[in-house]
Amino acid sequence: MELNKELNHAPENIHHIHIMGVCGTGMAALAGMLKSAGFEISGSDKAVYPPMSLFLEEMQITVFDGYGAQNLEPQPDLVIVGNVITRKNPEAIALAKTDIPYLSFPQALAHFFIQNRTSLVVTGTHGKTTTSSLLASCLYRANLDPTFMIGGIVREFDANFRLGNGEHFISEGDEYDTAFFDKESKFLHYRPDIAIITSVEFDHADIFENLDAIKRSFKKFVSLLPKDGLIIAHLDDPNVVEVVANAPCEVQGYGENINLDWSLTDVKADGGTTHFRVNHKGQEWANLRVQLPGKHNCLNALAVAAVLHHAGVTPETINKGLSLFGGIKRRQEVRGIVNNITVIDDFAHHPTAVKETIQALKNAYEGQRLVTVFEPRTNSSRRAIFQQDYIPCFDASDLTFIREPVPLESVAKKDLFSAKQLTSDINKRGKHAISCPDTESILTQLLPILKANDVVAILSNGGFDNIHNRLLKQLHTGKAA
C-alpha cells in the first residue's frame, strides 16, 4: 500500500470523506471538524461505544461497527486512515485495491485546516496538552478567534477542537508515528510557523529505539520552521538546547535561568492558583497567575505568554486569559469531593510527569495527606526501562498504590516493569507504597483507610477500570462499588 503523498482533489471537489478508526479521540475530533466544515462524513471502528459513539451520533456521522470492504460503498471521495489501523486490517486491504485517495490523520489536518492559517505547534515530551489548551484559551479571550485541535477536552469549550475565523491554528505536535504507511512523527506534517518546545526526553519505547532517535525527529521538526518563524524553547533542558542548535529561525529561550529571553521567578502557590513573575530580556515584564498547580504549569504558561507577546497581545490581556483558564479534563481534574475527601484524575505516566504532578498537588493541598494511585499503562511504562526512574517520583506522596500492569506479550518477562519491585524500592526510601494485582484490590484497600482532608491522586493515561467513579460511589455509600 503506497502513500498518496499529494491529494489531487481540491477541497471543493471532495464531498464524502470516510475515516478509518473514527472513534479515537483525535479522529473523532477531526470528523467533527470536517462535518462542521460541510463535508459528508462516515467512519468505521471495531469498538463503537460511548462517549465517542454518542458524540459522533450527535454530529450525524454514520459509523460502521467493524472493518470491511463494505464500508467503502458507496465509494467515498477520500479516506483518512487512523494510526490504529494496521497493514493487515481488512478495510485497509480493500482500500489498497481501489483508486480512492487516502491521507493519514496529520496529513488531513494539514490539508484541510492548517495550510491557509498561521500554524502554532506545541511540541515536547511533557505539557503539550496543557500548553496548547492555555494558548487556545488565551487567543480566544484576546478576541483572535483561533482554530485548534488538542489532545484533551478544554473545559472552556467543552471540546478538543474548534473552528474559528482567526488566522491561527493551534495543534498539539505529537512525536508518535503517523500511520502504518508513514512511520515518521505526526508533527512533521503540521507546517509550523511558530513552535513551542517544552521538553525532550526518552518516551514511546515501542516507536523510538533511544533518546537519540527522538532527538533526530525533533531536529527534523525544527528544520521545518521558515526563516521568519519563531521557536519558543525551554532552554533549561539541555536536550532542547541541542535540538534547536541549528534552527533556521529565531529561537527565544524560556525557563528559570534569568539570562534567557523569558524567565520565571517568585512562584507562589495559593490553593489551585499559582502566581509567578516574568522577566523579559532581564527586565521585569509582568506578574501573572494561572489556575493550575505546580511550577511546571507556570513554565507552560510562560511559553504561552511569549507566543502571545509575539502576536501583539498585551500583558494585561495575557494575564486575564491565563487567570480565567478553566483547565482540561484528565489533567489534575477534581472528579469529586465526598466526606471532605478529594479525588483527582491526572494523565501523568512518564516519570518526570509523575514526579512534577505529585509535587504540584502536594504543594497545592499543603497540610493534607496525599494518597497516590498509579497505573503504568503505556508501552514505555510497562517496560523495565523506567523501573529505576520511577523510584524517587513518589517522594511527595504520603501513601502510594501501584497497580501491576497488564504485561506486554511481545516483551520478555525480564524486560517488564514490576510494581512489586517498585513498591519495595519506594519503601526502602522511608516512604509507604503498596503494590496491587488489579483495580479491585486497590479499591478494597483504599476505602477503609481514607479520612477527611485526604487527597487521592489517580494517575493513568487510560480509563483505569472506571476507578474514579467507583471510588466516589464507595465513599458515598461506604460500600464496595
Image (cartoon, rainbow, N blue to C red):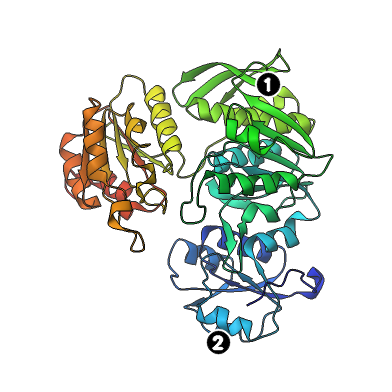
On-image quarter of the N terminus = bottom right
Q: Which residue is mark 1?
A: 260
Residue at (62%, 58%) from the top-left corner? 184
Is there any visible trace of residue 1 in the rendered image? yes
Residue at the (43%, 41%) spot, across then down: 348
Report which residue position mark 2 lands on. Answer: 70
For label 1, the crowd category at 10 Å Cα-Cα, with few meaning under 14, some 14 to 19 and many 20 or more, is: some
433 is higher (above) or lower (below) than 170: above
Label 2 residue SS: helix
Distance Cα–Cα, label 1 vs label 2:
57 Å
Q: How many callouts does the rendering have? A: 2
- Judge from the rendering whether residue 218 lies leftward or rightward of residue 274; answer left or right: right
Q: Secondary structure at mark 1?
A: loop
Circle 1: residue type:
Leu
Q: Position of residue 83 (x, y in %)?
A: 55, 64
Q: Nearer the viewer, residue 205 or 162?
A: 205
Q: Pinpoint residue 469: horizontal percent, then vertical percent.
A: 31, 49
Specify the label residue 346 is tagged with: none
- Along the line of sight, which residue is nearer the eye, 110 or 345? 110
Left or right side of 102 for 154 = left
Most extreme residue toward the right is 228
Q: Position of residue 299 (x, y in %)?
A: 58, 28
Q: Could one spot residue 291 in this view of the protein?
A: no
